[in-house]
Image (spheres, rainbow, N blue to C red):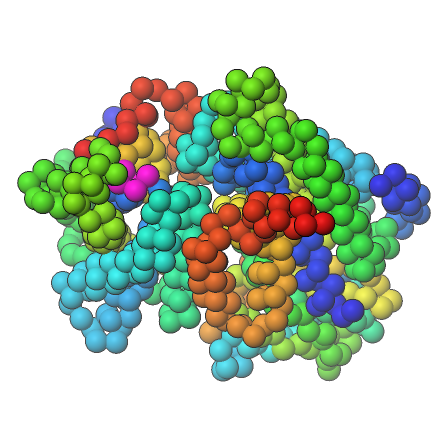
Amino acid sequence: MKSLLLIFLALPLPVHAQKILGSMECTFTGTDFVYDCRVTLARGGKPLEGVRISVGADMPSMPMAHNIKPVVAKPGKAPGEYEARLDLDMIGEWAIKLRLSGPVRDQLVLLYQFDERGASPLRDERGARPAARK
Amino acid sequence: MDDYAIGVLTNIGLFSFVALSAYLLLVAGELSFGQQAFFGVGAYAAGIGTAMLGWPLPLAALAAMGAGALAALLVALPTLRLRGLYFAMATLAAAEMFRILFEMFRWQREVDGEPVGPDGAQGFRGIRWVFEAGVEPIGFLALVWLLLAVVLAAFLLVERSRLGAALRATGEDPQLAGTLGLDVVRLKLGVAAAAGALAALGGALFAHHNTYIEPRNFDIMLGVHSLAYALIGGLGTALGPLLGVALDLGVLEASRVFQGYRMIVFGGLVALLLVFRPRGILDERLVHRITRSR
Amino acid sequence: MIDFLQSTLDGLTLGSTYALLGIGFTLIFGVLRKANLSYGPAIMVGCYGAAWVSMRFGAGLLVLFACVVAIAVVASVYVERLSFAPHRKGSAVAAMVASFALWMQLEEIASLAMPQHIYAFPPLLGAAPLAVGPLTIRVESLVMIAVAVAVCLGLRWLLYRTRFGIAVRAIVDHDTAAELAGIDVGRTFLLVFALAAAIGGIAGFLIVSTQEQVTPMLGMWSTLKGMLAMMLGGLGSLPGAVIGGLALGLIEAHSQWYFGPQVRDFLAYLLLFVLLALRPPWMTTRSAS
């Protein structure tokens, strides 16, 4: 226990970089709860390329127990775009978890409402940044 | 191991903390519907520690455990005399109050030009210590299970000690335990605080695994599930709750054989299991038989 | 003053559904001394079933009402057989956790059969609200209050004037003695479950036809509100459940008006917690009648 604490205390201080912003657009495929999604990543206003994204989804209640198997997104047509097909358990609200690896390591959580057409962002469309306060 | 396996194992580990917390109270004879509150307190406290105050995770986790124990004592003190369903309802009411307080809790500060902190029902984003410290998913998994192993070892030691016997005696019959000279009040408060700290440690790890928490994460479903896991796994040993969590999250959820029907299978299995083993798979009798034959 | 009166009226309306939910929950708890967490989910399954019948066949309200009650009763009987009958002489914790497991089952069955989650339900009356001076009264509110009163009277007759009622009261007094006197305790428990589900079904029907929609939240909501009404009125007393339900409705309506929904829920739980911690004398009643 003690040695573990020491290891973690001794880790180098984090280097702060500009935050990565993510967004997502989805269309319903017609098969129950399967969606084709396009994820867009940007950092400092520029598209972020060459990242490996593992896309998962959790339900807001009990995220540890209700989640879908994450899929790895393929690079899309435009720079900074990635494509993934999500197979959800039901329509409704999902917290989409983007786990980034490769040149950057990070995790973005996006909240979306899925329905019979596609997905619309809830509360916060800019990913890692909290919604502006009124 | 692929991402999914790591994710599932991490979730099993995280959930086990809450299940063990519910188990500890069950062994001491109390049925709590509210351990999710202390999981939530731990998640918020640790998130504030690392993301807002710039503390390292171990310090934040310790603070979270302190906050969880304190919150649990706050609930335990006025409910000391309650038993059975009365106690269960009081803990449920308390946990729902905590959840509503999380919804009203807004406190943010600028970190690197971005507002960070709890934002009421909008949740608390950017608890990114794990990424900033460069901990890989597999490293985090190891951390979760190492801490769980420490907790389990402590449980197994206590269960073999006089303290463990005192706990079970209090659980069986608090009045009798009192006449035997046990300080029931101190035992109960100690158990509540330890269970609160345990759930809070799980919450602290959960917040850092998820990077994002919101009040709904800590609703009654989490509490009732942890109670169910503890009871299915068995009340005979601290390995019971782990078995319960692993059965649902590991076997049913991860196998995906019953995709879409998982809850129907799980619900039916649990109800049937409890008919034959009302105190779980690893109940006291089975554990006693195994330990004696050794 | 007008606001206060209006909130009181709204509170009584809300309270009469809580009272019905509370009576159903109390009936089970008062007789078995065990909490049935699947109480609300059984009602929810009934409402989803009726919503399906309404969509498929465009059936009238009376048919839908019968559907809600019938399906809720069937679901409840299933819950009783699998999670209460085996634990009749055993642990209350095991029975409660088993009923929770079946809740998960019922919820998944409902969401598989009805994947859209939120379904429209035909309105109860669709009549314009009555204006009494500065106050507005929904006709549905009057119906709800009238039904709650009728159910209470009917239940009173059932418990004090029928053989079934005698059996129930005998079991509440002393279950072993009742069994020795030749009362079929298992069968009576099953009937109590069916009766509680029927009363819960009436409440569920009134709720969804007034809200004009069915949502998956109905299950958890009904269990929680039924439990709260029972707790506020003193565990296991039927008149207490009615008073508890009405009190809960009034507290919610007033605190909603003055402080908003978050504080409303907070106050309801705080009141419950304080009452439990202080244990005033009426909270320790143990009779079911």
Which residue is pictured at 62% across the width and 45% down the height? B288
**Is residue C90 visible to us here?**
yes
Residue B253 vs B69, above or below: the answer is below
Task: Give the percent coordinates (x, y) of residue B143.
Answer: 80, 50
Q: Residue at x 53, y 51 (%)?
A: B280
Compared across the picture, whether C216 is left or right of C70 comes to: right
Q: Quadrant of residue C21?
A: top left
Image spot of residue B255 (x, y percent):
61, 71
Could you say which quadrant of the image residue C103 lies in? Answer: bottom left
Q: Which residues are magenta?
A: C29-33
Q: Main secondary structure of the magenta part?
A: helix
Q: Quadrant of the C terminus of chain A?
A: top right
Q: Residue at image x 30%, y 42%?
A: C32
Figure disc tally: 0
Q: Is residue A84 above or below residue C85?
A: below
Residue at (48% x, 70% y) in the render: B261
**What x and y, as percent, mark residue B221?**
50, 50
- Depth order, front residue of A130/C85: C85
C61 in the magenta segment: no
